[in-house]
Amino acid sequence: MAKKKKSSLGVRVLNFALIALVLLSLLIDALYIYYKHINKDITIGVNYITTQLAIKDAESMSEEEREQHERRTLLIANLYSNDKGNGIQLQELKINYFTDYTLDETTYRSSGMQYVGDVSIEDFKLTGGHAFGITTDFIDENQVSSRFDYYDTTNGIAWSGFEGVRGVSTKFNREENFIISINGEAYSIQLNKTKEYDYTVLFEISRYTDYANWGELFQFVMNAIKNNNQGYGDYYITLDLSDFFTIRKFDKETGKFVKDDVTDIIKNYAVLKFHYDENGAVKANQSLFGAIECNNSYGYTAEDISQYWQERFVFDLTNENLQSRYSEVHGGQLLSLKTVDKIKFSQMKRVKIYITISKEEGIIGLDYNAFQGVPITELVIIGDGYFVLLENSLIDTNIKTIKYSSTIDLVIKDGAINSDYEEVVV
Amino acid sequence: MNKLKLIAKVIKPLLKPLLYALAVIIIITGLFSAIGIYKEITSKSYINGDLLGFENAFKQENFSFKTNSLSFYTDPVEENSFIYEITLLPVEEFDGLNKKYEVIFNDYEIINASINAGMVEFNQIIEFLNVDNSTINSTTINISLEFYADKTNLKVGTRTENIAYLEQYLNLNSFSLRVNEIK
């Protein structure tokens, strides 16, 4: 009899605890419904995806790094509209990213899409649907549009490798994840968003699903460029890519890219740097990838292939580029190059300097150190009468030829020139 | 009445297990709801990243232009002539009459540039040497800048028959032009 009372008491306690738990759970369920569906407070998360550089502090960048900063935004686009009718329409979109979460400079990579012609006429819509309660939607998440040429770039080398599903280039499909940097932290983005639309067919409400894809993004970007209010030129714009990309943050502790499924609204803005040109494209060097239609010689003919060793900038100096000084000792005006110009020319590499002096009235020669250190190819003196080259006037110039009129009485002082040269009477 | 009694007779032994099962289900949903509420209460709006350093410029203090994709087009007006034209940002207060400027083309200062009111123009000869130091091509490139109040027009032209050498040079070295005020 005593045993029966004990079990009865235990069962009652358990039942009481169970009822208490159930009531508590119902309360929690009610609270959850309130917070999720009735409470109007929302959270908004914003991701600004800008430069993809392995540098965390933008202010500490050197000049060269700053130039790179401007080049390596997440998205870069090129649009040669051919509004002048002098080439072809060329549209390109390049994405800059990393190959792993270390975000190191060695993991830089870029991939891109190129379209020749008018991309606005294409239809890239991907839809699947439900009908009459039966799921019929399916799309191939791995499919890559064959209407583009694709390129990859690593460390200055670009290559094209699209060959359907098993090509070697990066796949611009809904499965591909790109690792990017936001403020030095690793994230991944995947173009896989969908939108659901309801429509009515025969009194039945059906729904179809629109699948965002890279072709649509490409058109979206090109439309944004064409509709910018500044017109042609090079600018930055900020695109709202929330309808295209899912973003995940890299968790260093777990080693996983974690999706944010708590925040009510997530906005993803990306900086696009674009070049919008009224000309058409004519040569491969105008492409972001150095090739058009996978041809890095596009626009070049056999005659265009030129080989040279080095170039030289040629400068022709005359009396107008020189200063003069009156010398009582020599009884006339002596010419020389200004010191600031001497410094400029002496620092120039690969130049040829030709000097033509017209012996106008009062001019009697070149001053001391007139052209010292300036690389001179040829000196021509035109006119008649006495003309002197004073000491060091042409020293360290490596001058090769001095030409002068037959009516010039040329006097070259000792120490005026320290290179082998020839005199030519013209 | 007999049917109801029969139903009651069948259901009665199943009632207790059903209630216990329902209780467990409610407790489990309560657990998930608790996790959901925790996430809802602790979630906050956030901003990752910023747009610092990405401002567009709509004018420039000194003229500066650089490109490594310059390609020449056949001039529709002049025969045997090739041009490259581009419209760029306006320059603030360019005054070739009352101010002094230096013109730098690909790191070479062009001392013979003609500067007047709102324009700069010059011709520059570039020679191309073969491996034996002989000259295989000589090109004159004509560059003009027109500084309007709302834009700057840059025109680069050449009448050389073979522009391949010039284009290759510009591909390897880029095209860079600066006009700086000397204060």
Image: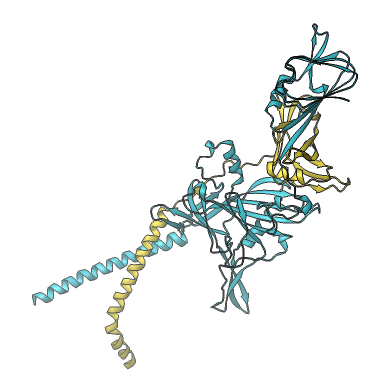
User: From this viewpoint, is residue B44 visible?
Assistant: yes
| Residue A60, horizontal then vertical, whole percent | 52, 36
| Residue A176, horizontal then vertical, whole percent | 54, 61
Horizontal side, residue A330 vs residue A93: left or right: right
Which residue is depicted at the point 33% across and 91% down?
B1
Q: Nearer the viewer, residue A86 or B34?
A: A86
Quarter of the image holding residue A355?
top right
The residue most toward the top is A329
Q: How many numbered marks appear?
A: 0
Q: Nearer the viewer, residue B121 or A48?
A: B121
Assign the N terminus of chain A to one quadrant of the image.
Answer: bottom left
Q: Nearer the viewer, residue A87 or B24?
A: A87
Assign the C terminus of chain A to one quadrant of the image.
Answer: top right
Colour chosen for chain B: yellow
Q: How is the image coloured?
A: by chain
Which residue is depicted at the point 66% across and 62% down?
A148
| Residue A275, horizontal then vertical, whole percent | 69, 48
Q: Nearer the viewer, residue A253 or A23?
A: A253
Which residue is depicted at the point 31% across and 68% down?
A22
Horizontal side, residue B16 vs residue A324: left or right: left
Seen in the picture, residue A313 relative to B5 is either above or below; the reply is above
Chain depicted in cyan:
A
Seen in the picture, residue A378 relative to A329 is either above or below; the reply is below
| Residue B105, horizontal then vertical, whole percent | 73, 35
User: From this viewpoint, is residue B151 visible?
Assistant: no
